[in-house]
Amino acid sequence: MVDHWHRDESEMRAWLGTLTDDELAAPPPDERAGETPLWVFLIHIVEHGVTELSDAAVLLRRAGEPTGALTFLDFFDTKG
């Protein structure tokens, strides 16, 4: 599972690293023409992370381990 997570994260970071400022600032594509807007992929990344965090918390709690604070704001505060 850890190996899979590392591969998944590596692929995500590689893709994110290819995005240019112009691509990030570009107007949304025409969805009617079948083009997928960039924001769809970015929301997927965020949502995937939330799901993974939730799954990990459940596994830790079932194993009797404390999870501590798991919200984004708690994480952000520790980076101070």
Image: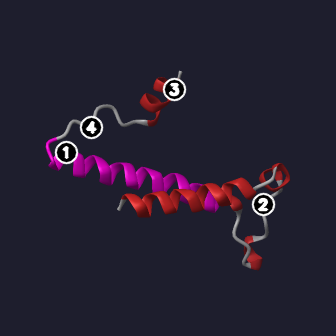
Write down the residue under mark 2.
28
Check disc 3: other Cα within 10 Å, few if <14, some if 14-19, many if 20+: few
- Please report the bounds of the magenta region as a residue range: 39-64
Mark 4 falls on what kind of element?
loop
Tell me the residue at 52%/51% (across/down): 46
Image quadrant in which you'd find residue 36: bottom right
Amino acid identity at mark 2: Pro
Residue 7 vs residue 46, the one in the foreground: 7
How many angstroms separate mark 3 from mark 2 (CA)? 32 Å
Quadrant housing the N terminus? bottom left
Tell me the residue at 58%/62% (across/down): 11
In this rendering, is residue 80 above or below 56?
above
For discs 3 and 2, the disc positioned in front in the rendered view? 3
Residue extending farthest to the bottom is: 33
In this rendering, is residue 49 above or below 80?
below
Residue 62 location, x and y as percent? Answer: 16, 49
Badges 4 and 1: C-beta atoms under 8 Å apart?
A: yes
Specify whether 36 is left or right of 23: left
In this rendering, is residue 30 above or below 74?
below
Specify whether 31 is left or right of 77: right
Amino acid identity at mark 1: Arg
Residue 47 vs residue 31, the one in the foreground: 47
Write down the residue under mark 1.
61
Determine which of the numbered discs, if any, sits on residue 67 in the image.
Answer: 4
Mark 2 falls on what kind of element?
loop
Determine which of the numbered discs, if any, sits on residue 79 in the image.
Answer: 3
Q: Is the magenta region chiefly helix, strand or loop?
A: helix
Residue extending farthest to the front is: 3
